[in-house]
Image (spheres, rainbow, N blue to C red):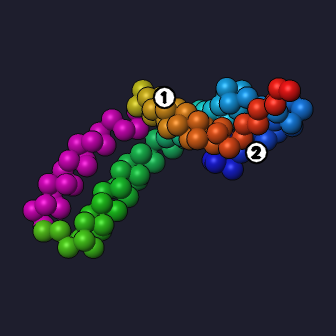
Amino acid sequence: AITIFVLAGKEERMKQGGYLSYGKALKTTFLAGFTGMVISGLFTLILINLIDPGLADVLKEQILESTRSMMESFGAPEDTISEAMEKTEEGMEDQFTPLSQLLNILKGGIFVLVIAAIVSIFIKKEEKIV
């Protein structure tokens, strides 16, 4: 993702004659990242809800197995593992609903904004006023 941000920012800077303000760099990198996130989120939404509705159950099982395996590798006691598994299972009930997927896209937008803000610091190149 960071590579895409950098490439988009550098391309925009080249289009602007070699200079790009921080604001324009942030706008460019954020739009590149957010567009990718929306495409990915919509693909997941279509995949889970239209193409393969059973995929959600498979993913839930894999998450539960992964959680148990990780906790066992850390040497957690069985009662702690059981409690964590119950909480994990409860938290996954609505994870793959369309509303949840759309909320994940919006939450991810905040993450994209932070990364875009950091990348934009390095992409910007202010024109020197003489």
Residue 95 in the image: state x and y as whole percent.
Answer: 37, 38
Residue 69 in the image: state x and y as whole percent.
Answer: 30, 68
Quadrant in the picture for residue 120: top right
The answer to whether the residue labelled 1 contacts the one labelled 2, judged by CB atoms less than 8 Å apart, is no
Q: Which residue was labeled with disc 1?
A: 106
Residue 73 versus residue 96: which sits nearer the camera? Answer: 73
First to last magenta residue range: 78-98
Residue 80 in the figure: left or right of residue 108: left
Q: Residues within 10 Å of mark 1 (few under 14, many from 20)?
A: some
Looking at marks 1 and 2 on the same chain, the residue that comes earlier in the sequence is marked by 2
Above or below 75: residue 106: above
Nearer the camera: disc 1 or disc 2: 2
Residue 41 versus residue 119: which sits nearer the camera? Answer: 119
Inspect the image, locate mark 2, and give the three-letter code of the amino acid beneath it: Leu
Above or below 67: residue 26: above
Determine the secondary structure under disc 2: helix
Determine the secondary structure under disc 1: helix
Residue 4 in the image: state x and y as whole percent.
Answer: 70, 45
Q: Can residue 56 be seen in this view?
A: yes
